[in-house]
Amino acid sequence: MDDNNNVATEGNKGNNTDGKSFSQEDVNRIVGERLAKEKAKTTQELAEREKQLEQKELEFKAKSMLAEKGYSGELLEAIRCGSDEELTKSLEIIDRVLEQRGLSKADIEMDKTRPRFTAPLKGRKSQEDDSIRKAMNLR
């Protein structure tokens, strides 16, 4: 009989697992929790990307509206474009401020068409200028 008990104990030692065994309900619950976490993480990442995309669209819209009004694109950094309403309000404020300072849209348009560079003065010729012009076949 002792042999039977020893054999039974030895048999149990071979099949015995030191780790915890899980029931099917436990496994289903653990997998469900992990899936829920991943889904929440993915949903949050998607929401952040969507928000960034909306912000880029508003910035693009702001740039085009500034260009339509003849304003410099540098003003984009100074205006709020978190929503359509903020953008419209910011542009209205810019219009009012410029009108109060005496600048009209016509002045801004005229400034855009004004040449940025002027021709060199006729009285100022140097020998370096001539040698460069000759090398480039400009004379």
Image (cartoon, rainbow, N blue to C red):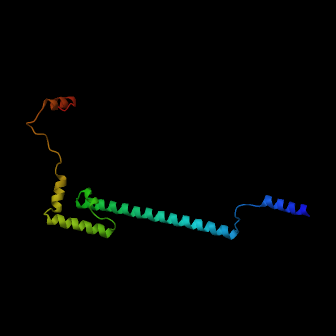
Residue under the image location 30 percent in, 62 percent down: 62
In the rendered image, the vertical position of residue 74 relative to residue 119, given as above or below: below
Observer-nearest residue: 111 or 102? 102
Residue at the far right in the pictured view:
1
Left-right relation of 52 to 35: left
Left or right of 69 in this view: 48: right
User: Where is residue 103, by image quadrant?
Assistant: bottom left
Q: Quadrant of the C terminus?
A: top left
Q: Nearer the viewer, residue 133 or 14?
A: 14
Where is residue 7 shown, x and y percent of the image? 87, 60
Q: Going 63% across and 67% down the picture, which residue do you hit?
A: 30
Q: Nearer the viewer, residue 19 or 70?
A: 19
On the rendered image, what quadrant is the N terminus found in? bottom right
Q: How many marks?
A: 0
Say which residue appears at 24% left-offset and 57% top-offset.
72
Give me the residue at 20% from left, 65% from top.
95
Residue occupying the far left of the picture: 123
Residue 38 or 129: which is nearer the viewer? 38
Q: Quadrant of residue 31?
A: bottom right
Tell me which corner region of the image, top left, top right, bottom left or bottom right, holds residue 23: bottom right
Image coordinates for residue 123, horizontal then vertical, percent: 7, 36
